[in-house]
């Protein structure tokens, strides 16, 4: 059973629906009526009654997963009662002619759209369509108003368009937040082991260092990156090789920011990488191997140590070993 009541918000009636989901858990959903409070109470009550009858709890949670392009169409239907005819005509033209076609080709949902996604669109308009600042400001108004509606529906908490300046191209996004967004973006484009390596480096090493500085993506300079490498080398005592691996992660993320026009250049291209010392390997003799095997006997790591000792496998190769790599008949 779906129950509900009306609520006033920002001068408009909003419907608050209460229902139980498939797991029996009580949920609430807010739906804008698009009706101003003054003189529309009976119409809002009628709309609430009709919505309660037609509301399907099984699909209620799907709104957050809707593509941003599809949400724009929904917003256009809702905003028609909120603005004058000329404003609506402009919104509809800009949305249907320029904004929706661009976002139709992306997988961006209304719940996960980020400032970088919006700035990426403005950069596209600047470079591909040579859009003037006046046009960009119009597109920005449409996107900002649509996402304000998403906030009102409680599909998102904050409006990401508030962090974007369509004219300057400046994205007021923290460097650390951008790194997390970049990780999420590449998650399905690289091997899981590669993603795990990137995520471990960025989440456990890079972000904890940069968090206290509160640097925006645009504020990061070559010196900031160089200082981080010196901190790792001198304070944490990591090897030059490890710092070079972290440099590769940072540079790759910033190269994407440069590619989509979020920054003017890649600051990681302007630093000096630490020089690595020539590696001199050493191996265990028979007695040392026997001592090693005794230490790890009956431990979870025993098999991994044996495989490493007998076959010279790297850690990643041991962890990634599959049954089809072993020939039991030929014992190899």
Image: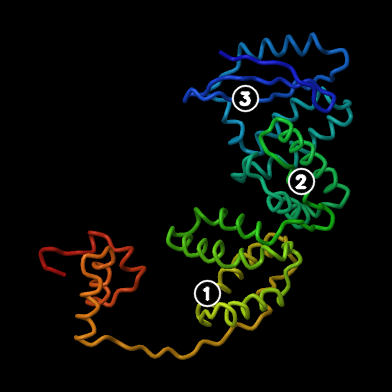
In the structure shown, which secondary structural element does the residue marked by tag 2 occupy? Answer: helix
Please identify the quarter of the rendering in which residue 101 is found.
Answer: top right
Question: Marks 1 and 2, how far apart in space?
Answer: 34 Å
**Quarter of the image where the N terminus is located:** top right
Relative to 312, residue 57 above or below: above
Place of residue 19 in the rendered image (x, y in percent of width and height, measured from the top left): 57, 19
Question: Marks 1 and 3, how far apart in space?
Answer: 47 Å
Identify the residue at image location x=76%, y=56%.
Answer: 171
Q: Are marks 1 and 3 in contact (CB under 8 Å)?
A: no
In the structure shown, which secondary structural element does the residue marked by tag 3 occupy? Answer: strand
In the structure shown, which secondary structural element does the residue marked by tag 1 occupy? Answer: helix
Q: Which residue is mark 3?
A: 28
Q: Which residue is mark 1?
A: 245
Identify the residue at image location x=84%, y=29%.
Answer: 88
Asked whether 4 or 279 is in front, the reply is 4
**Quarter of the image where the C terminus is located:** bottom left
**Mark 1 or 2 closer to N-term?**
2
Asked whether 308 or 331 is in front, the reply is 308
Residue 161's label in the rendered image is 2
Label 1 crowding class (10 Å Cα cut-off): few <14, some 14-19, many 20+?
Answer: some
| In the displayed structure image, the side of residue 3 where residue 214 appears, left or right | right
Place of residue 290 in the rendered image (x, y in percent of width and height, measured from the top left): 19, 80
Label 2 crowding class (10 Å Cα cut-off): few <14, some 14-19, many 20+?
Answer: many
Label 3 crowding class (10 Å Cα cut-off): few <14, some 14-19, many 20+?
Answer: some
Q: Residue furthest left?
A: 329
Place of residue 245 in the rendered image (x, y in percent of width and height, measured from the top left): 52, 74
Asked whether 272 or 134 is in front, the reply is 272
Relative to 207, residue 290 above or below: below
Please identify the quarter of the rendering in which residue 175 is found.
Answer: bottom right
Place of residue 183 in the rendered image (x, y in percent of width and height, measured from the top left): 56, 57
């Amino acid at each position: 059973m779906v129950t509900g009541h009306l609520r006033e918000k920002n001068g408009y009636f909003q419907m608050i629906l209460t229902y139980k989901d498939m797991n029996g858990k009580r949920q609430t959903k807010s739906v804008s009526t698009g009706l101003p409070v003054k003189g529309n109470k009976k119409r809002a009550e009628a709309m609430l009654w009709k919505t309660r009858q037609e509301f399907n709890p099984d699909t209620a949670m799907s709104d957050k997963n809707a593509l941003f392009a599809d949400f724009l169409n929904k917003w256009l239907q809702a905003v028609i009662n909120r603005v004058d005819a000329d404003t609506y005509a402009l919104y509809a033209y800009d949305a249907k002619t320029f904004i929706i076609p661009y976002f139709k080709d992306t997988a961006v949902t209304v719940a996960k759209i980020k400032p970088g996604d919006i700035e990426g669109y403005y950069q596209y308009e600047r470079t591909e369509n040579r859009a003037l600042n006046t046009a960009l400001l119009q597109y920005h108004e449409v996107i900002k108003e649509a996402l304000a509606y998403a906030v009102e529906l409680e599909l998102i908490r904050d409006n990401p368009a508030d962090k974007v300046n369509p004219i300057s191209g400046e994205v007021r996004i923290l460097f650390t937040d951008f790194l997390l967004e970049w990780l999420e973006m590449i998650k399905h484009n690289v091997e899981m082991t590669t993603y795990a390596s990137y995520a471990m480096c960025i989440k456990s090493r890079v972000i904890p260092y940069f968090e206290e500085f509160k640097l925006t993506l645009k504020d990061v300079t070559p010196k900031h990156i160089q200082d981080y490498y010196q901190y790792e080398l001198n304070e944490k005592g990591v090897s030059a090789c490890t710092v070079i691996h972290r440099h590769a992660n940072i540079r790759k993320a910033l190269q994407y920011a440069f590619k989509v026009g979020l920054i003017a250049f890649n600051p990681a291209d302007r630093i000096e990488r630490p020089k690595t010392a020539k590696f001199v390997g050493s191996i265990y003799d028979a007695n040392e191997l026997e001592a090693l095997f005794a230490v790890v006997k009956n431990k979870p790591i025993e098999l991994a140590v044996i495989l490493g000792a007998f076959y010279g496998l790297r850690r990643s190769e041991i962890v990634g070993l599959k049954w089809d790599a072993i020939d039991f008949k030929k014992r190899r």
